[in-house]
Image (spheres, rainbow, N blue to C red):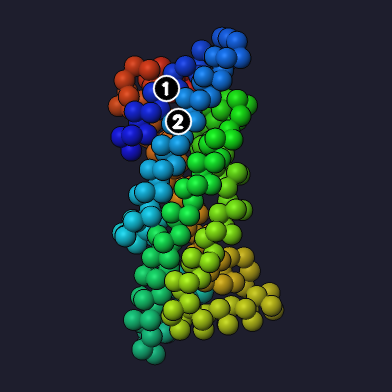
Amino acid sequence: MRILIRTLAVLAIALPAWAGGLDGLTNRQATSGLREALDQGARAAVSQLGQNGGFLNNPKVRIPLPGVLEKAKPILSMLGRGKDMDKLETAMNQAAEAAVPEAKTLLVDAVKQMSVEDAKNILTGGEDSVTRYFESKTREALTGRFMPVVTEQTNRLSLAKQYNKLADKASATGLLEGDEASVERYVTAKALDGLYLTIAEQERAIRQNPMQAAGSLAKQVFGALGR
């Protein structure tokens, strides 16, 4: 977080560049500064979530059981499957933690490919503009990268396999739709939601508290954006 705060100070060059209509070189410099800040933010989010307990011990991103299983938990517990439910929830979160490091390369690449227009949109697009940018550029590819890691983790538990069999039948009849149709899809989607949420929180903290961020330069940029 401190690294991101310090690096976001470079964004101060961006507002004069676009507000004052300076030459293209100044705009390129502003974009380069934003790239550096977002690169640090992405790496920080991956580091935070990709460690032991990164999801499991964080209530904001902890992945709960799929809704169907959560509703059935009292009955399954009565049938002696309570420990299996706990193991599955733990395994889902550990699977997300194991998958998140796969995101670093794609997030960094998305930063490198950011255009001047993208940078403008990020600076003027509101509190979640960084999140929306990363999601639009990386979610589909990251889904493909996360799935094998998540599958390897969750396949070790019999309850996950049983859930997938039941969910497959339910989805075929239209009783279950979307990500809950399999444990792997559900965990992958939730892991990505948690990743983008973490990036958003870092961005939001700086936009809301520019004075604590990195001194007068960050205050000037984000204070102006907040008016």
Q: Which residue in the protein does label 2 denote?
A: 36
Q: Residue at x 41, y 75 (%)?
A: 88
Q: Residue furthest right?
A: 173
Disc 1 and disc 2 in contact, CB within 8 angstroms: yes
From this view, report whether residue 39 is shown above or below residue 81: above
**For residue 145, which quarter of the picture?**
bottom right
Foreground residue among 129 and 11: 11
Foreground residue among 73 and 22: 22
Give the label on residue 97, or none: none
- Is residue 186 shown to the viewer in this render? no
Q: Residue at x 54, y 64 (%)?
A: 147
Disc 2 crowd, CA 10 A, few/some/many (<14, 14-19, 20+): some
Q: Residue at x 35, y 75 (%)?
A: 86
From this view, report whether residue 207 is shown above or below residue 221: below
- Residue 218 placed where, x, y %? 38, 22
SS of the residue at dot 1? helix
- Is residue 32 shown to the viewer in this render? yes
Foreground residue among 57 and 71: 57
From this view, report whether residue 143 is shown above or below residue 209: below
Q: Amino acid at mark 1?
A: Val
Give the left or right position of residue 213, taking residue 204 as reference. Answer: left
Upstream in the sequence, badge 1 or badge 2?
Answer: 1
From this view, report whether residue 92 is shown above or below residue 170: above
Give the left or right position of residue 134, taking residue 195 as reference. Answer: right
Q: Residue at x 48, y 72 (%)?
A: 152
Foreground residue among 45 and 72: 45
Q: Nearer the viewer, mark 1 or mark 2?
A: 2
Q: Which residue in the protein does label 1 denote?
A: 10
